[in-house]
Image: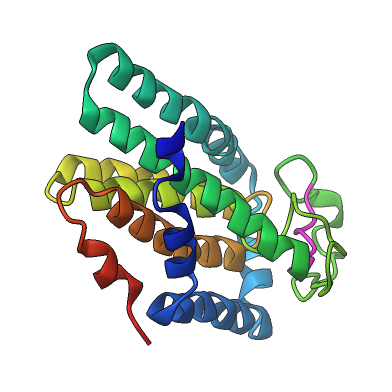
Amino acid sequence: MPELFHKLPTNVITIFSGRNLLAHAAAIGLTICLVHFGLDWAYYRETRAGVFAQIALPAIMLGSVVPVLGTVAILMSGWICKHRLLLNTGWGMGQAAILGYLISISYKAWTGRIPPPFRGFKMSAANANSLTDTSHGFQLGFLKGGIFWGWPSSHTTIAFAMSVCLITLFPKQKLILVLALIYAFYVGLAVSVSIHWLSEFVAGAIIGSVIGRVVGAGFDPNSEARISDIRMSK
């Protein structure tokens, strides 16, 4: 279990320092643009058809299950096979998932973003033409909007954090790169057409990628120096 917290304080500081901090600012700036220019609402109105709901539901379930069961499966395989690389990978992905969750809900606790209106996973056809644009609905302040909905998407943040962590640990494995990105984008885009606004997917992808890259570098057994490259000093 101590391996789960490997370089944890250093990783947290790195995630919020230097150029990585600029990535957080970019997530906020892109959100402001998407909301201000009506792109969140336009995307919402175009992506709530039934076909999107059918695609989204499995991805939302995967985004909830894989971070837990996937990490446990990797760790159990490492323990059974006594494979140090698998264990290191499992602990790294576990830390990335935990940080992705904690950082995303911390943002949510302060931004209070109102989720898009939905009935199940699609907009009701009966009121499709009468809905008011609620994409501007931020309730800034501590716990004014809870931590389970809102900005950024936790599903997306965790998916990208784990995927980018895995890619960072295995930079030369093209299959891992492709499969990890497919998973991350599938989960992220699915929530953007169901329970989240587009900007919440965009922000989650940016923030999650920063988390994954930092944690992956911290768990990289081949390069203790890589973390200094990721920190991006001011």
Chain part drawn in magenta:
111-118
Q: Residue at x 44, y 24 (%)?
A: 72
At x 62%, y 58%, the residue is 104
Image coords of residue 217 (percent x, y): 28, 56
Magenta part, dominant SS: loop
Q: Is residue 76 left or right of residue 196?
A: left
**Could you tell me residue 26's position as x and y percent?**
49, 80
Q: Is residue 205 magenta?
A: no
Give the colouring mode of the picture. rainbow
- Residue reaching furthest to the front: 2
Residue at the image position 64 percent from the left and 48 percent from the top: 49
Q: Give the quarter of the image for residue 93.
A: top left
Q: Specify whether residue 76 is in view.
A: yes
The quarter in which the C terminus is drawn is bottom left
**Residue 178 falls left or right of residue 76:** left
The residue located at (40%, 60%) in the rendering is 209
Q: Residue furthest top?
A: 80
Q: Position of residue 78 (x, y in %)?
A: 29, 21
Residue 35 is situated, as x and y percent measured from the top left of the image, at: 66, 78
Please give left or right for residue 168 compared with residue 18 in the image: left
Q: Nearer the viewer, residue 38 or 20?
A: 20
Q: Vertical placement of 34 versus 68: above or below?
A: below
In front: 116, or 172?
172
Asked whether, in this view, residue 136 is left or right of residue 173, the answer is: right
